[in-house]
Image: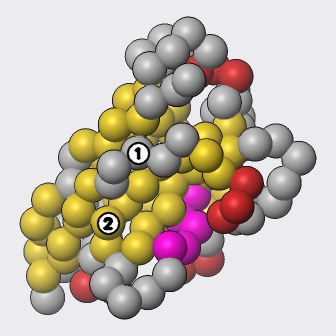
Amino acid sequence: QVQLVESGGGLVQAGGSLRLSCAASGRTFSGYRMGWFRQAPGKEREFVAAINTSGGSTYYTNSVKGRFTISRDNAKNTVYLQMNSLGPEDTAVYYCAVQRSGYSWNYYPAYDHWGQGTQVTVSS
């Protein structure tokens, strides 16, 4: 059973940057497709980015393309989300999760083993 722990959130001014980390337990992290989602107050959880097992393929929702970068370090059992040019619209709790293969990258029900989330607040 994999467990995920997110970290790196915080308060940042608009235009600033943050790097989120998601540390996974277990020995088979390199075999997991991973994703980041976020949930703003009063809104549904939405897909942000995903990465395949090797890190060679990445996927982003349109609103973060060019600003966010997902990456992974399989030796450290960690996936990252580098967030640049942040705006107030990026304020949310950010979650990482493991994706079951065979589904679209942004298909929420295909993700399991959610972490507890990390709060990102962007002030204007």
Of residue 44 and residue 54, the one placed in the foreground of this image is: 44
Asked whether residue 50 is drawn in magenta, I would say: no
Asked whether residue 46 is drawn in magenta, I would say: yes
Give the residue drawn at x 51%, y 15%.
Answer: 26
Tell me, for residue 93, which label it has, or none.
2
Give the x, y percent position of residue 106: 70, 64
Give the x, y percent position of residue 1: 56, 23
Give the residue drawn at x 40%, y 45%.
Answer: 115
Above or below, 10 against 80 in this view is: below
In front: label 1 or label 2:
1
Q: Which residue is labeled 1 in the image? A: 115
The answer to which of marks 1 and 2 sits earlier in the sequence is: 2
The three-letter code of the residue at mark 1 reads Gly
Q: Quadrant of the C terminus?
A: bottom left
Range covered by the magenta-colored residues: 45-49
Q: Magenta stretch mostly in which secondary structure?
A: strand
